[in-house]
Image (cartoon, rainbow, N blue to C red):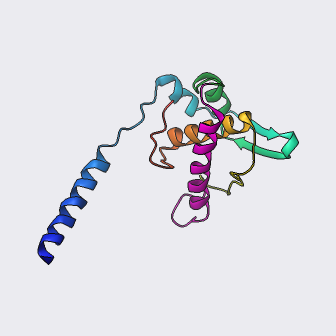
Amino acid sequence: MKKRYTYLFFALAILATITACNQPKPTISASENDIFNKSTNDTVTIENDSLEYEIIIIDPGYNSWLQGIARPRGYYSQTFLENRNIFYVNEWNRRASQPMQYNPNLYEMQINYQNNIDYGYEVNYQLYNYFIYFQRKYAQRLGPFVPRI
């Protein structure tokens, strides 16, 4: 009986490995790749004055990517953006707290995003799109979702 469970375990492990290897990779267009290779300063400030909340993104190309590649405002609902942001922020913060395991140059600091605060559509839209941009540019996966546009 014990051997049967061992064989079953190994079969499931092999199946999981094969399935993980077949995950779709995001395709990056030539125009998106050009934006990723920009070296000019492209600072974006995300803020909500009424909540005194601010995020500053200093990543060359992000603003150009947001204007030219990302889905337009209104494409996603605020609920969708909030749910994805909660998920992405949790994974980001986990990686930022483990600099020996994850590149500290990518995950420099934690993000203080609380799911019980309504940051508004614009903050959620830009934060979500930064996570998509980041994952596509640096070939990172912050979760089970393929970072598509």
Question: Looking at the rendering, in which quadrant would you find the N terminus?
Answer: bottom left
Residue at the extreme bottom of the image, as rendered: 2
Q: Residue 110: give x, y in percent of width and height.
A: 67, 57
From the viewer's perspective, tell me whether residue 123 is left or right of residue 50: left
Location of residue 46 by image quarter: top right
Left/right placement of residue 93 relative to residue 118 reads left
Instruction: Let me know if residue 101 is in the magenta part.
Output: yes
Across and down, in percent, residue 6 comes to 17, 71
Which residue occupies the foreground of this view, 29 or 122?
A: 122
Q: How many marks?
A: 0
The residue depicted at 27 percent of the width and 54 percent of the height is 17
Q: Is residue 7 above or below residue 29?
A: below
Q: Position of residue 136 (x, y in %)?
A: 50, 38
Let me know if residue 91 is in the magenta part: yes
Query: Up-down: is 112 above or below 7?
Result: above
Instruction: Classify 138 as above or below 149.
Output: below
Q: Residue at x 61, y 22 (%)?
A: 68
Left or right relative to 145: residue 24 = left
Residue at 62%, 23% in the rendered image: 72
The overriding secondary structure of the stretch rendered in magenta is helix
Magenta region: which residues? 75-104
Q: Position of residue 45 (x, y in %)?
A: 77, 38
Residue under the image location 68 percent in, 33 percent down: 40
